[in-house]
Image (cartoon, grey):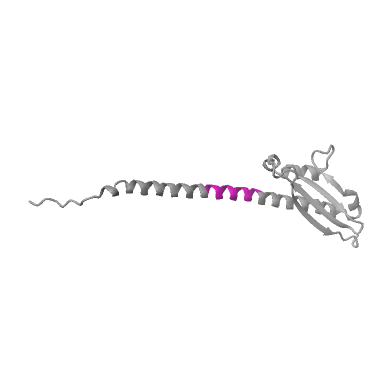
Amino acid sequence: MRKPLRIARRKSARGVVLIEALISVLIFTLAIIGLISVQALVIKNNTQNGYRADATTVAQRVLSDIQLDPVNAGTKAGTYTAAVPGANQWGKFASTTLPSGQVVVAVTAAKQVTVTVSWISAAEMQSKTAAGYMHTYKLEAQLNTNDI
């Protein structure tokens, strides 16, 4: 009977498979960490996009309320927040829809209406880099008072 052939191993090649396995685990770990950070960024951007959509809704509601009574539009200029005692529905709607939401309405003599909706999230409020920074959405329209 013949003896099986033995492949001679060099002493310098021992442990190479273990090092290769450790390197592949390291690469896999770095890829997972990268995917997690991308996922966090996507969640943050989706939240901001939701706030922008809500701000659009608030501004359009305010503008439609003003368009219902264009003759008295100038009396509706001002800043509206829920913090103001006796705040009207616009301030309450903005603060319940958006974090720290507020509405500023400006009306010119030519019946040009500008509705500015501002908000800032609690996380951004706590951030030292975002101090004094608020997101804004501005909607401008020209009222037509000729049909009245």
Q: Is residue 122 magenta?
A: no
Please give the range of residues in magenta. Answer: 35-47
Q: Main secondary structure of the magenta part?
A: helix
Near-viewer residue (3 or 82): 3
Q: Nearer the viewer, residue 67 or 14?
A: 14
Residue, x 90% and y 52% (percent of image)? 74
Location of the C terminus by quadrant is bottom right
The single residue placed furthest to the front in the displayed view is 12
Viewed as shown, does residue 142 lie left or right of 46? right
Find residue 92 and report its horizontal and vertical position in percent.
78, 42
Residue 104: image location, x then y, percent: 82, 48
Residue 147 at x, y percent in the picture? 89, 62
Farthest top residue in view: 85
**Residue lying furthest bottom:** 146
Residue sitting at 63 percent across and 50 percent down?
A: 45
Residue 40 among magenta residues:
yes
- The mark total stands at 0
Q: Is residue 115 left or right of residue 39?
A: right
Please name whichever residue, 132 or 92, is drawn nearer the observer in this view of the structure: 132
The residue depicted at 89 percent of the width and 53 percent of the height is 73
- Judged from this view, the residue extending furthest toward the left is 1
Query: In front: 105, or 122?
Result: 122
**Residue 16 percent across, percent down from the top left:** 33, 48
